[in-house]
Amino acid sequence: MYRLTRRRRRGDAEGTPRIGLALGGGFARGIAHSGVLKIFEQHRIPLHCITGVSAGAIVAAAYASGTPAADIAKVGSSMRFRHVAKWSICRMGFMGSERMKRFLEGVLKVHRFEDMATPLGVLATDLCTGEPVSFRDTGDVFLPIRASCSYPGLFQPVPYGDRLLVDGAMSIEVPALLARQLGATHVISVSVPPPTCIRPPSDVLQIVRRCFQIMQRHSEGVWRDASDLILTPDLKSIDWNGFEAGPELVKAGEAAATEALPAIREWLSPPAAAPDARLDERFA
């Protein structure tokens, strides 16, 4: 079963809550994010902002640009690894991500942060300092998304000024804090972690991926503490490159979002009216 973690509410502002949606990475498993968005769209859950890392950055940018969730799910279910990457072996990695720009041009309706229909935040990681690098408000989205998806060892790092940027999940697995920085009072985080490791890795990519997973497990407290609701769709044993399981991934995201609806509607319900002091005095 999928898991829904409900966190304590924090710093609620007066008036209508501003809901931020933070999408984690997961390669093909990130297709589940589109299922979450489909349910939110169908039930008219208002999003103040949306943030993403790695695969989550692609889905977040597509939705923020105005692409309907159903279209994102359709594209995600039909895409394959070759659509966003090309073998280009060099000292820095096995693949280049330049091909991703062409893919994004076909999915996003606008290509700059300032033109997004919903405020967007994308997170990458500085390969030298290890610090998160956030992109928001203004500028082209292609480089930030490519950088956020640049899984170390597999993809070549993306140059950015005097920096080299890699996968955002290296520093923050789910960008919940970035959603708060964009003004969200209530943050829903969607985590699509890999399946449980049953047997030891058998090749170099599996070793790198497993090291990545261990590192994330020890640092997940940061983004969990910044979240009010945490959705973990039940993705069973679907692997990181299981693009052929797209429809199943979408359904898992839908199920997790459906389970979360009562808690979200509670945020959106108007507070109960305070008793009339004058009425209390009358019956004192």
Image (cartoon, rainbow, N blue to C red):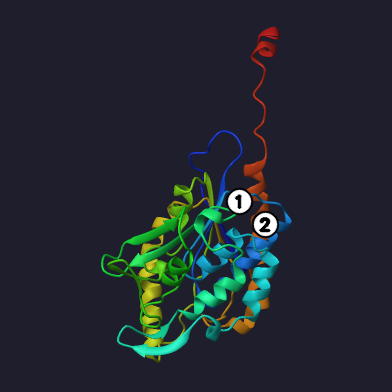
**Quadrant in the picture for residue 132:** bottom left
Q: State which tag comes first along the sequence, 2 or 1.
A: 2
**Residue 175, can we see it?**
yes
Q: Residue 65 has which mark?
A: none
Q: Residue 113: image x %, image y %?
A: 50, 57
Q: Where the N terminus falls, by quadrant?
A: bottom right
Taking 35 as reference, is 174 left or right? left
Q: Which amino acid does label 2 sit on?
A: Phe
From the top left corner, tell me how far across and down residue 48 is, in percent. 57, 48
Q: Do the residues labelled 2 and 1 touch (CB within 8 Å)?
A: yes
Which element carries disc 1, helix, strand or loop?
Answer: loop
User: In front here: 46 or 119?
Assistant: 119
Q: How crowded is mark 2: few (under 14 residues within 10 Å), some or many (20 or more)?
A: many
Q: From the top left corner, tell me how far across and down residue 170 is, in percent.
A: 37, 69
Residue designated by label 2: 40
For the residue pair 197 and 119, the one nearer the viewer reads as 119
Kind of residue at disc 1: Leu
Q: Is residue 120 above or below residue 17?
A: below
For disc 1, the marked residue is: 47
